[in-house]
Image (cartoon, grey):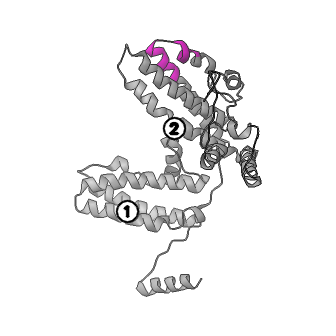
Amino acid sequence: MFVDEISFDFWPISWERAERMASFHESKTTIIADSKLLYVRSEEDKERFLKLRDTILDFQRPENRMKWVEKAESELDNVYVHLYKLETASLPNQITFYRIEAHAILTNLLESLALLNQTYFTKGFGKNREQIMGFPLKPANLEKDMNIILHSDRREDILQACQQLTKETLEIILAEKEKYPGSPSYPDRLKGFYEEFKGALDKIITACEQGDYDTAFFNSIHVQDETARSLYFAEKGRWPTNLTSHSAYMDGYIRAGLPELIPLLDVNRLSVLQAAVERLSTLLEHHLQVNGVIINRFDDNEHFAAFLRDSHIK
């Protein structure tokens, strides 16, 4: 609205949006954390609002550090579509395009860095440089690359600055995640995993026997990748994300001595793949049992029916 030709924000927001701000699912957390209450409709509303501030304070406790790192990683994930557009575009005279995409990259990167530093921006972009440069965790050349993005009109320079900032921010996030390795817990995290996956293994074996390469291809890659991801989860208590390197989560699969299926995909050697899948089935079951996972295997229908009756009683 305007008063004497001066613009003022009169910005109603829903409780749902306010809750998202307080839980750092949306930027502008400062609206909740740092605002002054001038009027409340009821004591109930006041109490609800103050609880949102408590949510922010609780989230900032040291024991919630890993949640911040994960949110920073999720925010960084938003950068890559814009980076892809910059890298693949061939519009030498379209500085508008490059600046729009670089702006999206930079703002997402900075939001990621704020989360990584367990804080939120108290001022809007353009007014928050001092806060940004005061972050303990930040890329070494953050200010230099920021200035290139803000001032350069050369596509190559803008792209290189965006790539460098993205690379260094990811490295910081991954280094922070390594500080919280988690502890293994197979029995609760992988309960029922083998029983479900046995069907996928059998599907590959049948495909190999029938010469169905397409089915073998899709299921073999799914089985190896999902098994590696699940073992990572069992070891660390968190799933690998889109930005987790392939080697980081495939390492557990290799260390467990499980056979790689993907390199064996060859339409002329399906029998080799079949043998590897059969070996994987045996070794995976053994690996899970050694780590305390109970495999539900029944000799006959009567045995299975008794299990269901006992489970129902419990």
In terms of image quadrants, where is residue 166?
A: top right
Query: Can residue 166 be seen?
Result: yes
Residue 201's mark? 1
Q: Is residue 249 above or below residue 199?
A: above
- Seen at 61% across and 46% down, the residue is 20
**Residue drawn 55% across and 81% down?**
311
Q: Which residues are magenta?
A: 147-163
Location of residue 136 (image quadrant): top right
Q: Secondary structure at mark 1?
A: helix
Tell me the quadrant of the picture where the N terminus can be found: top right
Is most of the magenta stretch helix, strand or loop?
helix
Crowd tier of the residue under label 2, counting other residues whose Cα lies within 10 Å: few below 14, some 14–19, many 20 or above: some
Q: Nearer the viewer, residue 204 or 116?
A: 116
* 2 or 1: tag closer to the N-terminus: 2
Q: Is residue 166 above or below residue 280?
A: above
Left or right: residue 57 compared with residue 190? right
Q: Amino acid at mark 2?
A: Asp
Q: Amino acid at mark 1?
A: Leu
Magenta stretch contains residue 150: yes
For residue 191, the mark is: none
In three-dimensional space, the C-alpha distance between marks 2 and 1, rounded to whole angstroms, equals 32 Å
Give the residue pinned by disc 2.
77
Q: Is residue 291 visible?
A: no
The reply, left or right, for residue 138 in relation to residue 148 is right
Residue 9 place in picture, x, y as percent: 63, 31
The answer to whether residue 111 is above or below residue 43 is above
